[in-house]
Amino acid sequence: MTGRRRHWLGQAALAYEEAGHLTDAARCREQAGEPLPAAELYERAGELDQAAACYLRAGRVAEAARCHLARGRPVAAADCWEQVGRPLEAAWILVVAARDAERARWLLRGHVPDTLGRRLRHGLTLAMCAALGGDTGPLAAAAGAVERELARVRPAAERLLVERWAVEAASEVARYDLAALVFAAAHRSGLRGAAGRWRAWAERALGGTAGVPAETEERRAG
């Protein structure tokens, strides 16, 4: 594509966006070879299938998966992660959103987590597979491992991800005691915002925040 054509497509995209014609603006960005701006415009327009495709072309797998999940297509979301060699993320979506423990276990065959955070998330995923079959014992063990080891997970972004998966797993099977243990561990570890997330979760799940620490200024977790 010539630079001149790209320029005029960009100008057309701006004009369409200013007029509120987001889908047309997105098409112009896509034709100009700008998949990320196109994806963002498609998403704003509610065209989530096109947004997901453009996000994938831009290498933004998490955003593509989010669009598929918003459309109620968890298998497509899992496929996004599988295509880029991230079986753990794919398996988590399959077991939590698609309730497909068999395929989740298949994806994790031979998968060896390479960090503490991923090891904890791997344990949570397999525990959720067992929970779908009615056995919550492995989930209690996995949540206990999170409680003991969360403070050692680095970086803070991975620690937050472990917290989220553990709380989601516990909430899925109504083991609110396990969720509280995980939030307490996150709070002790200094993970930013843990108290606020704990209180918000307690309001939704328990209808109150009795026993939950008040929100205070928390140190940044490293």
Image (cartoon, rainbow, N blue to C red):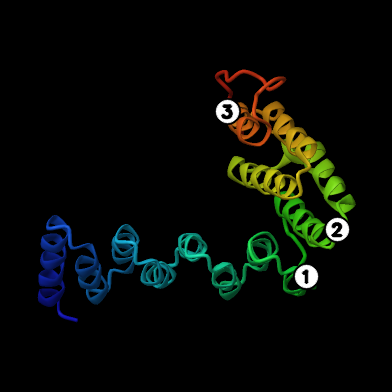
Quadrant of residue 192 within the rendered picture: top right
Which mark, residue 196? Answer: 3
Q: Residue 21 location, x and y as percent?
A: 18, 63
Q: Is residue 205 left or right of residue 1?
A: right
Instruction: Please tell me which of labels 2 and 3 falls first in the chain.
Output: 2
Q: Residue 213 location, x and y as percent?
A: 66, 20
Q: Residue 121 location, x and y as percent?
A: 72, 53
Q: Is residue 54 above or below residue 171?
A: below
Which image quarter holds the N terminus?
bottom left
Q: Do labels 2 and 3 touch, CB within 8 Å?
A: no
Instruction: Please tell me which of labels 2 and 1 falls first in the chain.
Output: 1
Category of crowding for the residue at label 2, using alpha-carbon neighbours closer than 10 angstroms: few (below 14), some (14–19), many (at least 20): few
Residue that numbered label 2 is attached to: 134
Category of crowding for the residue at label 3, using alpha-carbon neighbours closer than 10 angstroms: few (below 14), some (14–19), many (at least 20): some
Quadrant of residue 145 within the rendered picture: top right
Q: Residues under labels 1 and 3: Cα distance? A: 34 Å
Residue that numbered label 1 is attached to: 105
Element marked by disc 1: helix
